[in-house]
Image (tube, helix red, strand yellow):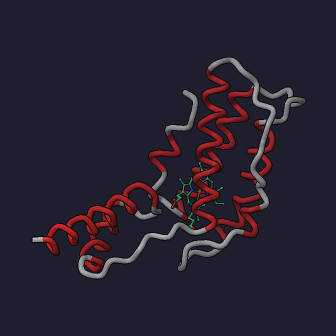
Amino acid sequence: MVSFLSSSLRLFLVLLSIFTFSCKDNKSVEEETESTNNDFIMYQPSEMANFMNALYAYNQGIKEQITNGEVPTHMPLDLMTLHSAEMTKGKDRSQAWQNVVDVYIESQKQVADSLSSEDLKLRYNAAINNCLACHKTECTGPIPRIRKLLIQ
Ligand code: HEC
């Protein structure tokens, strides 16, 4: 009984971590849980995954500011981390990554550029669309969450 409980708990934790954070879509999550059923692997987010979550939280705050009519002027995160952070095993900076990363960085900087004359909402949505452009090939799991960052 005790061991049944603890293995269900472990399975639950695996599912929770996969559904919450990882790049995988639901189909590969099912395959994964089958193979890791008895063989629990501790979920260790990579440096890049942590940075991505910080980017997410930052943009959530920016969205709120913009919808409240405020003008964001502060970008506390070092976007160059995208070039240096270690990624989850098996992931790398592919050609598709390289094609988008600097375009994204530039667009994200422009969101907090108080001297820009371009419409703030357009600048913000452009940055989020660049998140999505990279995720389309590099990491599809979080796409529905990232879409929620767009300002309609
Ligand atoms: C140049 C490509 C690229 C851009 C731009 C990009 N991402 Fe990512 N993102 C990735 C990759 C690759 C991973 C997987 C990283 C890893 O597992 O090491 C990832 C992972 C994530 C994750 C999952 C983190 C986790 O806990 O596993 C979230 C959420 C995320 N990104 C959100 C965003 C948001 C929001 C933006 C824009 C503000 C963004 N990403 C911009 C490629 C990108």
What percent of the width, then of the height, locates residue 130?
65, 49
Q: How many numbered marks appear? A: 0
| Percent of width and height locating residue 131 | 62, 50
| Residue that lies at the very extreme toward the front in this rendered image | 2
Q: Is residue 94 visible?
A: no
Q: Residue at x 53, y 79 (%)?
A: 90
- Quarter of the image that includes the N terminus: bottom left
- Figure quadrant of the C terminus: top right
Q: Is residue 32 above or below residue 54?
A: below
In this orientation, does residue 25 appear?
A: yes
Q: Quadrant of residue 4?
A: bottom left
Q: Position of residue 121 (x, y in %)?
A: 68, 28
Relative image position of residue 65 (x, y in whole percent): 66, 26
The residue at the point 55 percent across, 38 percent down is: 149
**Residue located at (20% from left, 66% from top):** 8
| For residue 64, side relative to residue 13 (left or right) | right
Relative side of 41 to 105, left or right: left
Vertically, is 34 above or below 79? below
Residue at the limit of the structure toward the right, as seen here: 115
> Which residue is located at x 68 percent, y 40 percent?
126
Left or right position of 148 against 50: left
Q: Quadrant of residue 12?
A: bottom left
| Extreme residue in the left direction | 1
Q: Is residue 142 left or right of residue 59?
A: left
Which corner quadrant of the figure contains ligand 1? Answer: bottom right
Q: Is residue 94 above or below residue 12?
A: below
> Foreground residue, 34 or 1?
1
